Amino acid sequence: MSEPAPASTQSELPRPDDGATTHRFGVNVASNMAYFVVNTGLMLWYVPFLVRHLGVAAYGMVPLANSVVMYAIVVSESLYTAYFRYLAIDLNRGDGEAARRTFASASLLTLLACGLLMVPFGAFTLLLPYTLAVPPGLDRATQFLFAGTACTLLAGLLTGLFSTSSAIAHRFDLRNLGRGASVAARIGVVAVCFALWPASLWHVGAGLMASAALGLAIDVAVWRHLTPTLRFAPGAADRACVRRLFRMTGWSAINMLGLLMLMHADLLVINLMFGPEATGRYGAILLIPLLVHTVAEIVLPLLAPLIMARYAARNTDGIRDLVTDAARLLALGLALPAGLICGLGQPLLTLWLGPDFAGMHVVLALLVGHLTINLALRPVGYIFTAYDKMRLQGLVTVACGVAYVVMAVSAARWGGWGVAGVAGACAFVWTLRNTAVLSTCAARVLGLSPWVFIRPLAGGAAMLVGLSLSGLLIATTWPPRTWPALAVTATALSLAYAGLAWGLLLSASDRTRALALVRWLLDRRPWPGRSHGDPAPQTPGLGAPAPGLAPIRRTSPTGWPRSRP
């Protein structure tokens, strides 16, 4: 960590807003929810829009390009983890000199990463027609699409550097402004081009480039506004700081590599084994599990600083209680959307993408159902970070990634499962990793029973199964054939689910906390006994974040949440 700067230097850099006032909390929550709703609505419209205009085979190149290029997240996420941590500490301490050294060093590493990634991106783009199954006549257009996707990620490396200011200052409203404008540019450029010329993958690539440029420009403007004393000066990098940042990327990169194998190898396997048509059909429904990830991301990043605060206090019991409560409540919360999608998947796909996709409901259930367990166990991963056990987590994740690829190919080719075998292998390996390995290892790190983090998932798992079977029975007996009918069915099942969960699975303290939070949000006034200028209270039963550390919200360079199992 950087040495403390003299008092005169520290005073030059204003400490970031701690985000603790009622007003700032409300603005950030409203901003996150608004971005989620708008982005979800746009993407739900955008995917079938592309499928209709491009065709299934050509559209399959869009998620495939993103899947291939996303492997560079190994670099960007590892760098982001390193420089966000050190820069957040420097800014929260008001140490202007250390913050400038950190930012300059991070700038140099980011430029080096961009330069290094341009080589494999360029080579893969040139050799693409010889490495992947591309629809006939679309070689050049697919190459341009891959080039546009690569430019988006390279711009995202720079965006990740500049966007740290808004995250540290808790200005999620400004952060979401750039993300929303980027999504609007990507879709708007494509829609205009499709209206003026025959639809082509060239237009999709142009939309990606336009969105990358606009998002980067907005993040740079926000960075200059929030941290005017920082300078993008790679030449002023500090050698010791560069080494410190570089070392921190090691095991994080290994862990990310394993995660990407688990999360993005499916499209590559399907493309190589079943061709572009199957790739397009599979890629079209991937938006739905991505939305479940997005819902979880509203809560999950807030838990890391809470766990770190308990680790700093050597409060093992506090870590246990926080992680078990979070796993239980997340499982219950995620079982609702996952159960609705698993049960009503066939009518949903029929109405959304057309009758030709109705047969993909089994694949959709395999992609979504396991998220109830695996996303609920995400807080367990923060224990490895707190106790500096990233090596163990990284090795386990890479081993599971390799096992998944082998199992997916075996199930698809020799097991006769087809595309469903690829999705099923992912669900099985991912769940095995989180339940049988990481959860038990994390419990051992804390000196607890190996089942301590698994037992709280029972209620959510049972509700998932019950809701899925209920939805499947309705879809089979009285299938909803219109969007209003589907909405009414989903609402009725949701109300029944909420009643059962409230009465049977939530504790008295859970209900008290929920009612207190609802009353506070509706009244829009501070918690009892506090004024608007006081620090924000801790959520009942959760505790306060570690002093000097800002909550971290990670997003991918293209605006999608970075979802970690």
Image (cartoon, helix red, strand yellow):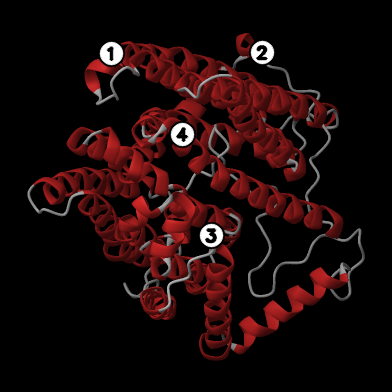
- The earlier-in-sequence mark between 2 and 1 is 1
User: Do the CB atoms of the residues marked 2 and 3 lie less than 8 Å apart?
Assistant: no
Observer-side mark, 2 or 3, equals 2
Q: Which residue is labeled 3 in the image?
A: 311
The percent coordinates of residue 215 (x first, y second) are 66, 27
Q: Amino acid at mark 3?
A: Tyr
Q: Which residue is labeled 4 in the image?
A: 78
Q: Secondary structure at mark 4?
A: helix
User: Do the CB atoms of the residues marked 3 and 4 lie less than 8 Å apart?
Assistant: no
Observer-side mark, 1 or 4, equals 1
User: Do the CB atoms of the residues marked 2 and 4 lie less than 8 Å apart?
Assistant: no
Query: Around disc 3, counting alpha carbons within 10 Å, would you say few (fewer than 14), some (14 to 19), or many (20 or more)?
Result: some
The percent coordinates of residue 103 (x first, y second) are 64, 24
Q: Secondary structure at mark 2?
A: loop
The percent coordinates of residue 89 (x first, y second) are 66, 39
Q: Amino acid at mark 4?
A: Ser
Q: Which residue is labeled 1 in the image?
A: 127
- Disc 1 versus disc 4: distance between alpha carbons? 28 Å
Q: Secondary structure at mark 3?
A: helix
Q: Residue at x 37, y 70 (%)?
A: 447
